[in-house]
Amino acid sequence: MRIVALAGGIGGARFLRGLLRAAPEAEITVVGNTGDDISLFGLRVCPDLDTVMYTLGGGINEEQGWGRADETFTVKEELLAYGVGPSWFGLGDRDFATHIVRTQMLAAGYPLSAVTEALCDRWRPGVRLIPMTDDQVETHVVIDDPERGRHAVHFQEWWVRLRASVPAVSIAAVGADGAKPAPGVLEAIEAADAVLLPPSNPVVSVGTILSVPGIREAVAARTVVGVSPIIGGAPVRGMADACLTAIGVETSARAVAEHYGADLLDGWLVDEADAGVAAEGVEGIEVRSRPLLMSDTEATAAIAGAALDLAAELAGGRP
């Protein structure tokens, strides 16, 4: 079986770990979000790609869900001693090595997709990890700051430094309109038996991937099943509600399904807390309810297995 998953950071990475358990023989391609990418200290940092790579490769800090296990922060402390910032983005010593290698390879002319493949040679994540594009795309957020007025900041500053506490006026994937899917992305989608949308942020993770011209159209042509990142009217993790509010979408399992649209989604898994959505249905989308809390790998594997079962059922009804 050939599966494609569109993944952001922590939620997507943990779902993928369950997917590997649920479908150990499957050929899995992960299209990773690069809209969160940022340049810091002269280095190119790709948070979502690295979170997937570290999580599936056994190097993640399990407690926080990002960064390296057994991390130290000597370099960060020395930079602060020199008065060099930003201080709000916590790069550890082990993590710095990944970004140094990536930046050197990019400077040598290698595209991000080739760099990611090379980094994965070390981590052996068990999936083919491809960035959504080799072109630079960065998510920026327009905010109304009481002191500075209306201005745009990088998504990471809004998310990490401000903790999304300043309401977003708008969110934009800068550079997405002119970007092209990375080599292998469209081919993997076109060959997929199923495309899965993990419980990643629907605006700045999955939404950013779909904003790259050609990707949404390719995904919509396949059997697509999504897993709701919203349980009982609240995000499972993070501040997806702040992102949804910025684009005028209610924080609910139904609203997210409708935001993706029946032209994209064939099936939608919601939590039992949102069983009413399954009972009432969403026009054009097959909705099922089941426990969606990814409490451990076994529970997550059961969620991934349910998504695959629904995809197989829906694909059976297609020409």
Image: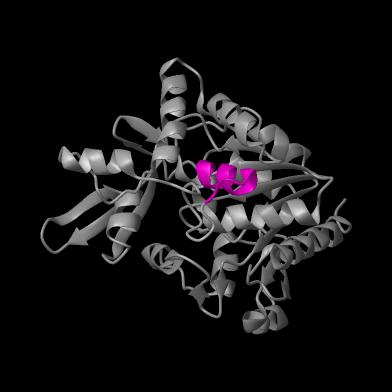
Whether the magenta-drawn stretch holds residue 75 is answered as no
- Quick one: 209 or 109, which is closer to the camera? 109
Give the image location of residue 244, x and y in percent: 44, 65
Give the quarter of the image for residue 171.
Answer: bottom left
Query: In this view of the protein, which residue sits in the foreground, 194 or 212?
Result: 194
Q: Position of residue 63 (x, y in %)?
A: 50, 61
State the predominant SS element of the stretch in magenta. Answer: helix
| Nearer the observer, 179 or 138 | 138
Region rendered in magenta: 49-60
Q: Is residue 55 on the magenta stretch? A: yes
At horizontal 70% and vertical 78% (from top left) the residue drawn is 278
Looking at the image, residue 296 sits to the left or right of residue 211; the answer is right
Determine the residue located farthest toward the top in the rendered image: 108
In the rendered structure, the answer to whether residue 147 lies left or right of residue 118 reads left
Residue sticking out furthest to the left: 147
Q: Please tell me which residue is depicted at 85% across the width and 54% down the height of the picture.
A: 318
Relative height, residue 81 to residue 122 (above, below): below
Q: Position of residue 153 (x, y in %)?
A: 26, 49
